[in-house]
Amino acid sequence: MNIPFGENLVMNALFDSFQQRGVTFRNRIGVSPMCQYSSQDGLASDWHLVHLVSRAVGGAGLVFTEAAAVEPLGRISLGDLGIWADEQIPMLAKIAKLIQEAGAVAGIQLAHAGRKASSATPWAGGSPLTKAEGGWQPLAPSAIAFNDESPVPTVLTLEGIESIKQSFIQAAQRSIEAGFQAIEIHAAHGYLLHEFLSPLSNHRTDRYGDSFEGRIRLLTEIVQAVRAILPDQLPLWVRISATDWAEGGWDLEQSIALSQILKNAGVDLVDCSTGGLIPSVKIPTGSGYQVPFSDRIRQKTGIATAAVGMITTPIQADQIIRSGQADIVLLARELLRDPYWPHRAAKELQVDHHQYPKQYQRAW
Ligand SMILES: Cc1cc2nc3c(=O)[nH]c(=O)nc-3n(C[C@H](O)[C@H](O)[C@H](O)COP(=O)(O)O)c2cc1C
C-alpha cells in the first residue's frame, strides 16, 4: 500500500512491492551477498542451493548470490563462487529457478577481488595463501599491499584492465543465461573496482587514475558495457563503499558524484556499504550505521538505494523504508541467524498481505 504524504512524495513500507524495470520484488527485504567459501573450481554446490533457496522460502523479496568471481585470479579464496566458465552456468541456473519458484527475485553479484585475492578461507585464518597452498599473485591498480602480511600486487597494464572488463561482460552474459533477474557489480569492500576508485589504492597516472574521472573510469566503462548487453527489463545495481573512513580516501562526496554518473549510465540502484579498503581504520559501527549514506545518496541524486549493515529488527527495517532512507534493505548476518526473518517480520508488523509458502501456511 502506498501512503501519500506531502505534495508528491509517496511513502512505502517494508512489505510493499518494489518495481525496477520489468522486475517486481514482492517486498523490500533482500539477502545481502555473502561468501560461503564452499565452491570447488568456482562451481555452485548443493550447499549454495540449500542456503540460497531456503532464504527465498523464508520470504525475502530478493536473494543475492555471494560475490561470483569473473575470473579465477579474482577470487578471494579457492572456495569462491565463480562465473568465468560456461560449466558454472547449469547449477546457478537451477538455483536461480528455485529462488524464483519460491517467489523471490534471483540476483547475482559479480566481483574481482583485486589485491585482496588469494587468501585462506575465514575459518582457516584468512591469511594470504602461499604458492604451496595454491596461492597466486594478486592484481591491482597500483603496487600497494592491503596490509603488512599481504603480497605487493602486480600493477594491471592497460591490456590487463581491458581483459578484466571483458571478463565482467562475459560474466554478465552468463548471468543472463543462468536466469538471474538482477545483476550487482561489486565495487565495494576494498576489492578491485573499489581499489580503482580510492585515491589511497590508486596511484596511477594514466587514464585509469590521476583524477576522479580517471579513478571511476573502469567502473563506469564496465557499467556501460554490461548495461549494453543486459535486456532492458533487467535492473543493474552497483555496490559501493560510500566511504573509506580514512583521511584522503574515497568519501561520501565522491560517492554522490559517482552515483549521479552511474544513474546517467543506466544503473538502477546504488547499494550503500562502507569500508574494507584500509584495514586499520576505526569504523563507528552500530545499529544501522551505514543507513545515512544510503539516505544522502538517495536524496542528492534521486537514484534508488539499498541500505545494509546491522539492520536486524523489523521495526528498524520498516522505518528505514518508510522514512525514505532507502528503497530496499539488505540483511546479511541476521538472515544467517534466521532464514525465516521476513515471515517473522511480517507477523510482528501485522502485515496482512504477506504470502507464506502454501506448504507452510498452517504454521502461521
Ligand atoms: C559471511 C559473510 C560473507 C560476506 N560476503 C560478501 C560478499 O560476497 N559480497 C559483499 O558485497 N558483501 C559480503 N559480505 C558483507 C554483507 O553483504 C553485508 O554488507 C555485511 O555483513 C553487513 O550487513 P549485516 O550487518 O546485515 O551482516 C559478507 C558478510 C558476511 C557475514
Image (cartoon, rainbow, N blue to C red):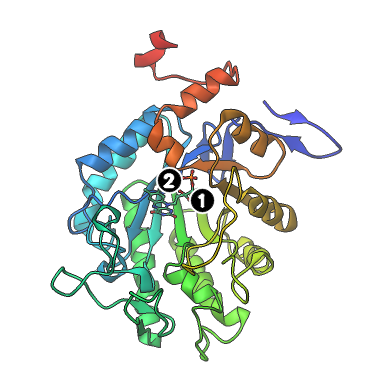
Describe residue 5's horizontal placement relative to residue 100 as left or right.
right
Residue, x 59% and y 65% (percent of image)?
245
Q: Earlier in the sequence, mark 2 or mark 1?
A: 2
Identified at 49% across, 68% down, the residue is 280
Q: Is residue 94 visible?
A: no
* Residue 11, horizontal then vertical, whole percent: 73, 34
Give the residue number, with chain letter if any, for mark 1.
235
Residue 3 appears in which quarter of the rendering?
top right
- Residue at the spot 57% in from the left edge and 29% down from the top edge: 314
- Mark 2 crowd level (few <14, some 14–19, many ≥20, 10 Å Cα): many
Residue 359: give x, y in percent of width and height.
34, 15
Indicate whether 179 appears above or below 319: below
* Crowd class of label 1 (few under 14; some 14 to 19; many from 20; radius 10 Å): many
| Residue position for label 2 | 181
Q: How many marks?
A: 2
Label 1: which secondary element: loop
Where does the C terminus fall, quadrant-wise? top left
Q: Secondary structure at mark 2?
A: loop
Residue lying furthest bottom: 205
* On screen, residue 277 above or below 30: below
Dot 2 and dot 1 residues touching (CB under 8 Å): yes
Q: In this rendering, does residue 181 appear at all?
A: yes
